[in-house]
Structure formats: structure tokens, C-alpha cells
Image: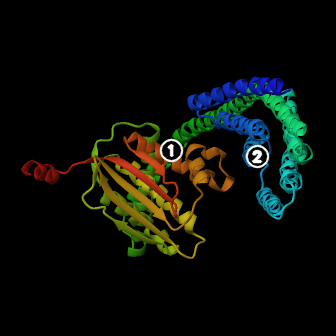
Amino acid sequence: MKTSLSFLFLTSLIPSILSMGLAFIKYYQTKKDEFLHLGEFYASLIAVVGTSFFFGAYSVIPWVWTVRTSTMLMSDMTGINCFKRFHLIALGCGALISLGLGSVGFELPVAIAPFAVVVGLIGISFILEAFLRPERSNFGLLHYWTSLLILAYFLTRMTFPLWVSDIDGREFGVWVDGFLLLLFSVSLYPLYGEIVFEKQEKFLQKVLHIRNKQLFSHSIFSEYKILSAGVTHEINNALTIINAKIEQLLRRKHDDDSEKGLRVILNSTNRISRSIRGLREFIYPHDFNEVLSVSEVIDHVLMLYGQRLKNHNVNVTTNGLGGKLVKGHRIQLEQVFLTLINNSVENIDQLDEKWIDINCRSRGNSVEIIIRDSSTGEDEEMENMLSLPFLSTKENVDSGIRLVLAKDIVEKHGGSFNFIRDEDNTAFKIRLPQVESDETIQNRIYQ
């Protein structure tokens, strides 16, 4: 009997150790947590069978480890976390009761019973929860077989006090544990191959779905640009006629109020013309060679937008704008900052605290401009607006399109446009290549 028991122990131990080693090797190769969980599960079972073979009753020591690794196994199979806080409390209570019974002189089968029953019930609850979930419909034959083996293992833990009291019973327990270990070593690795393959397939499907959304968004964006080209042409023609007529009227003599009104109309149409030219430059881009002061560009935007900022009681602060030069197209860069300020005003319109902070600093060969406001935008929502504006919520579609246009303009200037994650407030960061002034170059030469 002892010889056959040793043979079973070695027969189950060797393939399990090989399977455990292979699982850990696959984990280090692929960095997939599923293989790490598999290796730890094999290790916990080997510990149970080893202590059961060599030390008999002391095999209860690694039971808690098998509870943990079984939780990870069931999580990989079903996608749900079966282990709850009350399971941990139950384990602690069972262990304390068993220690208490043992300390007052109860025999081992009686003392260990509370802990054994708790461990068995926890394992059975794992199986029940997995089979009561809708995910069970995706189970294959290997899933059911592995679940049956886990159930058998925990039923064996629950009945441990019944067969631990004599030599024959302990040998029976070693036989059962060794046989279960052998079955696990044969069936688990193919199951995990299926699990990893299914997860990889789902991941690829998700990536494909995102790519399809992006292609759909880009196609709409291309149509938007084509439509914009036609619209800007028609608006530009109408503005040319309006400007010509206003200039004719201004050459005639009018009272002061009439002349002032005509000049307001003329300034407004000129501002529309600049915006149209900026849109046309975006649609039909060309070289951006004008050296611009960041301070002048942003100051001009704040001047144009000043009345609306006052109307909404928005406090604007600027810092570090002076002395920063970039090369680009004035109207387009003004449009970028106008978009961000307008986006901030819309975000903070319903807040009690309304402020916008514009901070500029040099970073190597770049100028970094951070525009932050008092709102607290969701990271995922803001990033979606930049990547998939046409698929954002209805309220955010317009903002998303404007932000994408601004991002495109900055990138055409050789810069970058990003939403800053993990900030307390909504913040966008723009980086543009910096142009050194003649004074800076001369100072560096003299140094």
C-alpha cells in the first residue's frame, strides 16, 4: 500500500511540477497574468499533496493558499471575482474556532472540523456563483470538467475530519489528493490555452471596433472639410460684396452715429473674413513662415473675446507669455487659442467659480502653453472628443470638432496638442517649435 501510494504521489507530482514550470515560463515570455495564476494554482496543489503525503494532518496549512489560487482560476474562467470580503471573515472565524477547540483538548478531527467546513463551503460557493452567472453559456467541455475537479477538491476538504482520524483514512486522503493533482495537471493547461486565446480574440475584436470607429470618424471629417471649402467660398463672395457696399457708403457724408455703425459692421465683416481665411488655410494649407509673438497672438484673442468673458464673469490670468516667439500662421494660431478659450467658457458657464489660466514657458526648443480652467472634465470623455468627435455625446460633438480642428492646426505647425490627464482641473497643453529672437541669439554668442 505504501509503495503504491508513493508511486501515485510521484506520478502526480512530476507532471504537475512540469506544468507549473511551463506556466511560469509562459508568463515570463508573454507577461499574461493567466499563466501566472495557473502556475500559482499548481504550486498550491503541490504544497497540499506534499504536506498530506509527508505530514498527514498538517496538510491543512496550505489550504488558504488553494482558496486564493482557486479564486484566480475561477476568475480567469468566468471573468468575475468570486472571492468576497465575507469569505475572508469566514476563513478567519473558522481558523479561530478550530484553534480554540484544539487548545481546550478536543481531538484533531473535531478541532479541525469548523475550518474544514468553512473552506469546503467557500469552494462550493465559487462553483455556484460561476454557474449562476450568464457567462456560463460560454463554457466549454474543459470549463465544466475543471469546475467538477475544483468541486471535488473542496468537497474533499470538507470531509477531511472524517478520514483524518486513522492511518487508512489519511492514506485515502493522499490517494484522493494525488489523483486530483494528476487530473488537474492533465486538463488545466489546455483550458488555459483556450482562455488566453479567447481573451486575445476579444482584445483584437475591440481594437478592430475602435479602428472602424476611427475610420468612420475620419471619413466624416474629410466630408466636413470638403463641405467647408464650398461654404467658405460662398461666404467669402458675400462678404466681398458687403464690404464693397459699406466702403461706398462710408465715402458719402453721414452723421456720426451712422458712420460709427457702418464702421462696426465693416470691422465685424473683416473679422468674419479673417476667420474664413483661417478656415481656408486649414483646408488648403501652405508654409507657415511668419514669426509671431505668443503674447501678441493670445492678447489679440483675449481682446476679440473680451466682451463675452465679461458677460460670463470669467477671470482670465496669463503668465510667462512675454519673449516667446513661434513661426506660423497668425490667423490659424489665433483660431486655436480662441477654440480653447471658448471651450473653457462653455465648460465653466454653470459653475460658481469661473477662471481660465494661460501659462507659457520654454521647454528646450519648444514653447509650451497650458490652458487650464476651473471645470473638472472626465479624462476619457475629453480624449474621446479629440479622437472620435463625431461619436461623442450630442452636446459635445461641436466642441469635439473644434478641438480636432485646433489639434490639426497645431500639428501642421510642427507642434503637439494634448489633453492633460490626472489633473484636478481641465487642462490642454500645446507645444510649438520656438524661434529665438535676435537678442537671445546675440546674448548666447556673447556668452
Against 422, is 232 above or below?
Answer: above
State which quadrant residue 144 falls in: top right
> Does dot 1 land on a helix, a strand or a loop?
helix
Q: Between 252 and 169, which is closer to the camera in this rendering?
A: 169
- Identify the mark at residue 232; answer none if there is no mark: 1
Task: Give neighbour class at mark 2: few <14, some 14-19, many 20+ (Cα, 10 Å).
Answer: few
Horizontally, residue 23 falls left or right of residue 105, namely: left
Q: Is residue 89 left or right of residue 288?
A: right
Q: Are marks 1 and 2 in contact (CB under 8 Å)?
A: no
Where does the image place residue 380, in percent across and percent down from the top left? 60, 51
Residue at the location (81% across, 24% down)? 3
- Image coordinates for residue 129, horizontal then vertical, percent: 87, 47
Query: Label 1 amino acid?
Result: Thr
**Residue 245 visible from this viewpoint:** no
Which element type, helix, strand or loop, lies under badge 2?
helix
Question: What residue lies at 70% left-to-right and 30% top-to-bottom?
Answer: 196
* In this rendering, position of residue 343 left or right of residue 175: left
Give the percent coordinates (x, y) of residue 118. 85, 54
Q: Residues within 10 Å of mark 1 (few under 14, many from 20)?
A: some
Q: Nearer the viewer, residue 308 or 140?
A: 140
According to the image, label 2 marks what residue? 58
Going from the N terminus, do you reach mark 1 or mark 2 first? 2
Q: Is residue 304 above or below residue 336?
A: below
Quadrant for residue 137, please give it.
top right
Residue 229 picture location, percent across and down:
52, 39
- Three-letter residue code for mark 2: Tyr
- For this orientation, the residue located farthest to the right is 162
| Residue 98 seen in this snapshot | yes
User: Which image quarter is the N terminus in?
Assistant: top right
Residue at point 58%, 49% (across, down):
385
